[in-house]
Image (cartoon, coloured by chain):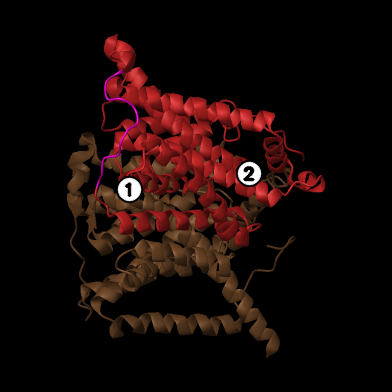
Amino acid sequence: MDTFLAQFLAGLATGGIYASLALALVMIHQATRLVNFAQGELAMFSTYIAWSLVQAGIPYWVAFGLTLLISFAAGIAIDRLLLRPVRGSPALPMVVVFIGLLVILNSVAGWIYTYTVRPFPSPFPSEPLFGQHYISSHDLGAIGVTLAMLAAIYAFFRFTPLGLAMRAAAQNPESARLVGIRVGWMRALGWGLACAIGAAAGMMVAPIVFLDPNMMSGVLLYAFAAALIGGIDDPFGAVFGGFFVGVLENLLGAYVIGQELKLTVALVVIVAVLVVKPSGLFGRTLARRV
Amino acid sequence: MAAGNLPRSRIAPRKWAALTALFAALCVAPFLLSNFSVFQLTLVLAYAIVLLGLNMLTGYNGQISLGHGAFYAIGAYVAAILMDHYGVPYWLTLPAAAAVCLVAGFLFGLPALRLEGPYLALATFALAVALPQLLKHKALQPWTGGVEGITLVKPDAPFGLPLNADRWLYFFSLAVAIGMFFLGRNLLRGRIGRAMVAIRDNPIAAEAMGIDIALYKSLTFGVSAMFTGVGGALGAIAVQFVAPDSFNVFLSIAFLVGVVVGGLATVQGAVYGALFIQFVPNIADRISKAAPWAIYGIMVILFMYLAPGGVASFIHRISERWRRRT
C-alpha cells in the first residue's frame, strides 16, 4: 500500500507538469484552432533562459519571474512576426511552420548550450515536507505551481475584462471584431500566455528529467495526450487529463508492464479512450449544421 | 475534379513530351553520377512512393497522419525479415510488404474513423512513437534482431546486365515507382479518387450521394499504408539495414513536411516533397555545421511563406503565367 501511494503521488507530480504543458496547448488551440507542435521546445528554450539567469547569480524566484516575462514577450513576438504572414492559410501549412519552429529551437539550443545534460536547481527543499515520506517536496511543489497557475488562469479569464475579450475573440472572431476587440492582439496574448505557462512547466520538469535540448519530447507527447483526453478546448479537462495521464503512466509502469513498454501502453490506453469518446472526456460534441 | 462525367482523362501531347524527356533524363542520370548520388536518388524514389501514399490520405482524403513512419517501418521490416530469415528474393518482398501494410493500414483505419483533425493526428502520432519500442521488444527479437536490427545484402543486377548494384537498384526502384505512380494517378483520377475528395470537402453531401464514407475512409487508409509500405521495403533494400531507431517520430514528421512542401492533393507534389526531404537536410548541413537543423527549419518556414500551396502549386502558377504570355 505504501509503495502504491508513493507511485500514485509521483504520478500526480509528473501529471502536474503534463497538465501545465497541456494547458499551454489548450490556450493556443482556443485562440487559433491549431495544435502547437513547438510548445515543448519553447518550454525547453525558456528553461535554458532560466538556467542562464540562475548561473548569472540571480536568485531562483527572481529568475523564475523574469523567465515568465521573457517567455511571454517571446510568445507575442512569435505570433506577431512569424505567424501573422501565414495567417489565413489552411491548417497544414501552419502545422508545418510549427514543425519548422520546433527544429529551429531545438537546434539553436543545442548550438548555444551544447547537448550536454545539465542539472537544474529546484527551489524546494531536498527533504520531504511535513515529515511524511510519500512525496518529495519538489513533486509537491510542482503540483502546487500547477494548481496555482490554473487558479490564476481561471481568475484571469473569468473576472477580468481582458480575459473576457480574449474568450470572445476565440469564440467568435468576427463579432468580437465588430464590438471593437483587437482580435489579432488577443491571439498574440494567447501565445504569450501559452509560452509563459510552458516556461513554468519546463522549469518544474527540468530538475526531474535534467536539462538538455531534447528533454521535452516525451513530455510534449504526454501533454498532447492529456489535452486531447480532456477535450482540447477545456482548460480544466486538460489539467485533469494531465494528472490522469501522469498517474496512469506511473502505475502501469510500476505494476503492469514494466518500464519498457510504458509509453506504448499509455498511448494505447489514450487511443482507446479517444475511440470510445472521440471529443475527449469533457469536450462537447458539436452538432454540425447540414 | 469537376462534376459530372469527365471524359477519360488523357495526357496532353505537350505533357507527353515533358514526361518522355524526364524519363530519358532519369535513365541517363545514374551513369553520370557517383554511386552515392545514385543511392540518394534511389531513396528519393522510395520517399516519392511514400509521399504519394500519404498525400492520398492527407491531401485527397483530408485525414492528417503523423504516423506514416510506422507503416514505412512495417514495410521495411517485412522486406528485411523475409530476405534475412526466409531467403525470399528482394523483388518478391515488395508485394508482401504491400499486402501486410494494406491490412495493417485498413485495420488501423477502422478505429481512426471516429477521430477527426488533431485527434486523428494524435492517434497516428502515438503509433509512430510506439512502434520503435515494440520493435525492440524481447518477444519479437528472434525476427527483428532487437536494437541491433537486421543487415541486408545489396542485390546484384540479374541476367548479367552490365550495371553495378547501386545502379541496378536505382532502375529497379524507378520501375516500381513508375508503376506505383501509374496506379496512384489512375486511382485518384477515377471514381474512387473523386469520392475521396468529396469526403474531404463535404462528408454529408458525399454520403447523400451514396458514398460509403466508412468504407472509403478506411480503404484510403489501407491503400495509403500500402504505398508507404512499398516505399519502406525499397528503402530498406537500398539502405541495407533496418533498426528500430531509424524509424522514429521525426521520420513521420519529415513525411508530413514533405507532403505539404511538395503540394497537397497533387500527384507530382510527391516527387518535389521527396527531393525536399532527401536533399534539403544535406544542403542545410553544408550551410551551417553548427546548427544544420536550424537552417532546415528556416527553409521549411520560408517555403511555407513563399509557396503555401507547396512546390506543385508554385510551379503551376508560374507555368500558367508563362503560357498566357506566349
Left or right: B134, with A99 as reference point: left
Above or below, comparing residue A139 to residue B44 in the picture: above
At x 20%, y 65%, the residue is B154
Residue A196 bears which disc, if any? Answer: none
Query: In the rendered picture, chain A carries what hue?
Result: red
- What residue does disc 1 label? A56
Give the SS element for disc 2: helix
Q: Which residues are magenta?
A: A117-128
Mark 2, Cα crowd under 10 Å, few <14 / some 14-19 / many 20+, is many
User: Which tint was used for chain B?
Assistant: brown
Q: Is residue A95 magenta?
A: no
Q: Is residue A81 visible?
A: yes
B176 vs A37, nearest the viewer = A37
Query: Which residue is depicted at the point 34% across and 65% down?
Result: B292
Assess disc 1: are there few (<14), some (14-19) or many (≥20) residues with their C-alpha within 10 Å of its C-alpha: few
Q: Main secondary structure of the magenta part?
A: loop
Q: Position of residue B81 (x, y in %)?
A: 23, 49
What's the residue at 17%, 40% (across, down)?
B142
